[in-house]
Image (tube, rainbow, N blue to C red):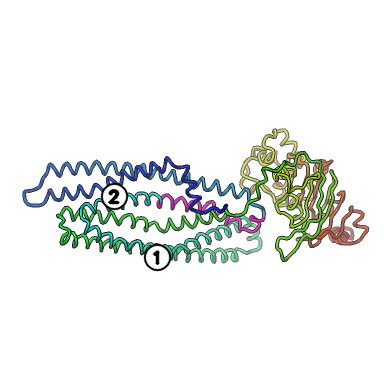
Amino acid sequence: MRVLPGALLRRALKKQKAAAAGTILFSLIVCVCEIAAPYLIGRATDRMIGPGQVDFPGVLIIIGLLAGMFLLDGLLLYLLNLISTAASNHIVAQIRREAYAVLNRLPLRYYDSQPHGDIISRFVNDADTVADGLLQGAVLLVRGIITIVGTAVIMVLLSPVVTLAVVGATSLVFLVAYLVTRFSHQSFRAQQSILGELNGCAEEYIGQIKTVQAMSMENTAQKRFDGINKRLYFAGQRAQFASSLTNPTTRFVNNIAYILVGLVGGLAGGLSAGGVSSFIFYANQFAKPFNEITAVTTQVMAAWAALRRMTEVMNEEPEPDDGNLPPLGSVRGEVVFEHISFSYWSDRPLIRDFSLQVAPGSTVAIVGPTGAGKTTLINLLLRFYEPQSGRIMVDGKDISAVQRDSLRQAFGMVLQDTWLFTGTVADNIAYACPKASREEVIAAAKAARAHGFIKRLPKGYDTVLTEQGADLSAGQRQLLTIARAMLAQPSILILDEATSSVDTLTEQRIQEGFLKMMENRTSFVIAHRLSTIRNASLILVLQNGQVVEQGTHNELLERKGAYYTLYNSQFEPEEKA
């Protein structure tokens, strides 16, 4: 079901009923104090008109009442701001939780097609913008409604004629606000969208700053950033200009209302001097909510645009719920591809009618040029993508008929792109096995040949790594991810260029650990270094999504086909030397 911004907001508000009730109650008391104050000031004014006619006792009583009301008003305003701020933060936290829960269920194709910086911006900048808009807009709206209704009732009681004049003049505020809102809404949406684009650009360049500097592309990066920043500036300028028109326009209308109070109240309304002064206060109070709300139009419109951007993520189609499907269960390791066809784009087919049968405990190596479809096969096997036709079987079970979590838990992956999080070395190794003992973590690190460099770290296994393990070399980061896979002891192993960032000597040592881990375990190995797959049970050579050759290392060399060409392109220079 599609999530609408208003529905999302209402759902979050339901969990803040106590805060909402407190906001309404305190707002009501504050508004009663503010509405009663002009009436008392008018009565005090009438008690001080005429020589020798000042009613000092009566005036002092009114002053005392006003002082008490203003003190109560100040205290309640403080409590009101406290409650509304807490409620606003809780509401935004709830929206963030719901949106992030959706992110966890989105398929890989969403992340492959969206700038990561823009996704992050929706949960950081946009959520903060929603909080600001809620805090200012919601409280002002509640107080504004109470003030408008209460003030209108008092004005009608004092003078219906003057009230009509004030309401007639003030109604122009609605027209002004409507026109400005229509004009500025698109500008605020564009502003939030460009802000996400700017975050994506910054995240991209900061994350790869070493590459940018190594290729002397700082100026190019700066020009691209400046271009997006300039567009953001003009979008923000248009939005701010539109919203800034409201406040001075409404204040001009208010001034007209004051003039009407004096003219109509004095000439036709039959008001006393105190009554006119009270009416001027009430005219100001009646228009004040409109002024305040229009003054925060910028924040409210930006908040609504930000909320729409967050709901756009929540309306993305998630992976279908498979809780009613049975788990995969224990895995022997038989994998069968039956007539698989797949393409990322409908007009560019990649894999066509691919079939393969892998016996339990086999090692299947997948080689081929970049873009041949090697990683795509793994994505299909893990159900990150679904094939357009055909099916994949694990131990005779169609993987589309079992729970994804149970399927993915049967696999262990070591990727070319390493991922580490802020935490200790031990925590990073035990990421998939949080209950593993320290002895098991150390054993996995030793098997991955990572124990040596870990012991040289300041606190060994308790050393806290920074984000993405930036304080380690690329090879050291990869050794930790290899240790992580070795600790998990999966039923089926996937190695995607797992040793691409380590030196040749370390690679040879790691291969010993891999060979031990791969014993009696089905393994899929994607490799460019063909020396690492000589002992594979089966080698698949892919080109344009098709298997052009398959066999063992020696069989493929004897055929002198595509594999023979790939192999000699790596080793012929060495042999000639």
Dominant secondary structure (helix, strand or loop) of the stretch shown in magenta: helix
State whether residue 502 appears in this view: no
State the mark number for residue 150: 2
Residue for point 22% across, 59% down: 162
- Type of the residue with mark 2: Gly
Mark 1 lies on a secondary structure that is helix
Residue 214 falls in image quadrant: bottom right
Asked whether residue 266 is drawn in magenta, I would say no
- Type of the residue with mark 1: Leu
Residue 221 in percent (x, y) is at 59, 63
Residue segment shown in magenta: 109-137
Residue closer to the observer: 155 or 27: 155
Q: Which residue is mark 1?
A: 179
Mark 2 is surrounded, within 10 Å at the Cα level, by few (under 14), some (14 to 19) or many (20 or more) other residues, namely many
Q: Quadrant of the C terminus?
A: bottom right
Mark 1 is surrounded, within 10 Å at the Cα level, by few (under 14), some (14 to 19) or many (20 or more) other residues, namely few
- Identity of the residue furthest to the right in this view: 558
Residue closer to the observer: 438 or 370: 370
